[in-house]
Image (spheres, helix red, strand yellow):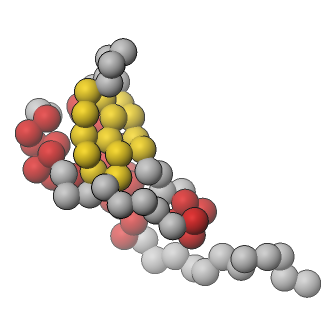
Amino acid sequence: MTLAELTACHGRTWTISGAVGGGWYAVRRAALSVYARAHGLSDIRCGATLDELAHRLEAETRLERQAWRRIPARPMS
């Protein structure tokens, strides 16, 4: 996987950059809601290689496409 290929696949949703200490990271272009975070979505994903980062971004995409049940804001009595 190259940076150009990864950007072509995920660049509309994520800004992808090389990390200072090595590896790669992606930051969402739009912040997530608390509701989305409660379902496991992340604002930042990291990988030691572009292939690893690609797998993590694909997992985020699959999670985004799942149907979510509404989580109660507070415990029900």
Q: From this view, report whether residue 16 is shown above or below residue 23.
A: below
Give 45 or 69, whichever is nearer the viewer. 45
Residue with the most extreme right position: 77
Quarter the N terminus occupies? top left
Give 27 or 3, whichever is nearer the viewer. 27
Q: From this view, report whether residue 35 is shown above or below residue 37.
A: below
Q: From this view, report whether residue 21 is shown above or below residue 27.
A: above
Quarter the C terminus occupies? bottom right
Left/right of residue 13 with respect to residue 60 in the rendered view: left
- The residue that appears at 42% across and 60% down in the rendered structure is 31
Q: Is residue 55 visible?
A: no
* Coordinates of residue 44 in the picture (x, y in percent): 42, 44
Please count the marks in the image: 0
Residue with the most extreme bottom position: 77
* Coordinates of residue 29 in the picture (x, y in percent): 31, 55
Q: In the picture, residue 5 is in which quadrant? A: top left
* Coordinates of residue 11 in the picture (x, y in percent): 18, 51
- The residue that appears at 52% across and 76% down in the rendered structure is 68
- The residue that appears at 36% across and 70% down in the rendered structure is 65
Residue with the most extreme top position: 21
Q: Is residue 57 visible?
A: yes
- The residue that appears at 35% across and 52% down in the rendered structure is 28
* Coordinates of residue 76 in the picture (x, y in percent): 84, 82
Q: From this view, report whether residue 56 is shown above or below residue 76.
A: above
